[in-house]
Amino acid sequence: MAAVIDATLKGASSNSYVTLAEANSYFETVPNSSTWDDKTDDQKNRSIISATRWIDGLNFYGDRCSTSQALSWPRNNYHVDRVELLCSEIPSEIKYATYELARALANDTDAVTGNTGTTGIYEQVELGELKVKYNTDSQAVGAINNIFDVYPWLQSYLGAYTIGGSGGYQVRVVRG
C-alpha cells in the first residue's frame, strides 16, 4: 500500500509538516539532489512521514494552536529571533529539517533503528568544579533516545524551537 501524506495545517489526521511537492521543490535548490531524486514517490512519502514523526517527538517551546491537531506544529506563544510563532504557518526551519531528515532516512533506512553502540551513554559530565556521575548500568545501551544523537546537524534547524530534545528535560545549573 502506498504511503499518503496529509499535510493539512492543524489537521486532526495530519501526518506530515510538508507535501511531496514542497520537498521536491526544496531539493531543486540544493547543490546535490541526486540522493532525493533517485527515490520513488512512495519512498519519498514514507521518508517524509517518518521524518515528521521523529521531529514531532521532540519537546517544543510554545503551545499547539489547537487541541485537535495531530502534530505539534503549528504552535504559538513563543518567539524566535523576536518573531512570534503563528498558527497560520509552520516555520521554514521545521520544514527544512523535515526535508533534510527525510532525505537522510530515505538513504539509510536503518539509521534510527537497531543498535547504536554506546552513543548517548555518559559515565561522567563535568562543568567546571561540578561533576555528575551516572550509573551506566541503568542507561539503555544502543537505544536511540533522541534523533539528535543520530543526526546532530538537526540542531541547527530545530535548536531554537526545542526544549532538551526528545522526551528530555533540562536542568539548569547556577553557580553561586
Image (cartoon, helix red, strand yellow):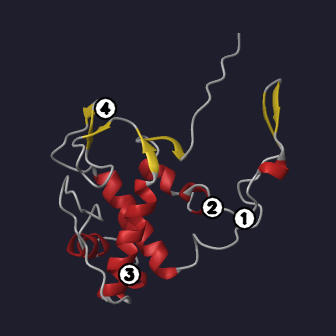
Q: Which residue is drawn at 63% across and 61% down?
A: 144
Task: Give how far apart the Cα atoms at labels 3 and 4 are.
Answer: 32 Å
Q: Say whether disc 2 or disc 3 marks the residue closer to the N-terminus.
A: 3
Task: Give how far apart the Cα atoms at labels 2 and 3 are.
Answer: 25 Å
Q: Say whether disc 4 or disc 2 marks the residue closer to the N-terminus.
A: 4
Query: Identity of the amino acid at label 3?
Result: Trp
Identify residue for label 1. Answer: 142
Q: Which of the two residues, 43 or 137, is positioned nearer the viewer here?
A: 137
Q: Callout 1 environment at 10 Å: few (<14), some (14 to 19), or many (20+)?
A: some
Q: In which quarter of the image is residue 6?
A: bottom left
Left or right: 111 in relation to 57? right
- Seen as rendered, the residue at the extreme top is 176
Q: Which mark is residue 36?
A: 3
Q: Callout 2 environment at 10 Å: few (<14), some (14 to 19), or many (20+)?
A: many
Identify residue for label 4. Answer: 79
Residues marked 4 and 2 touching at CB (< 8 Å): no
Identify residue for label 2. Answer: 144
Query: Identity of the amino acid at label 2?
Result: Ile
Q: Which of the two residues, 108 or 15, is positioned nearer the viewer here?
A: 15
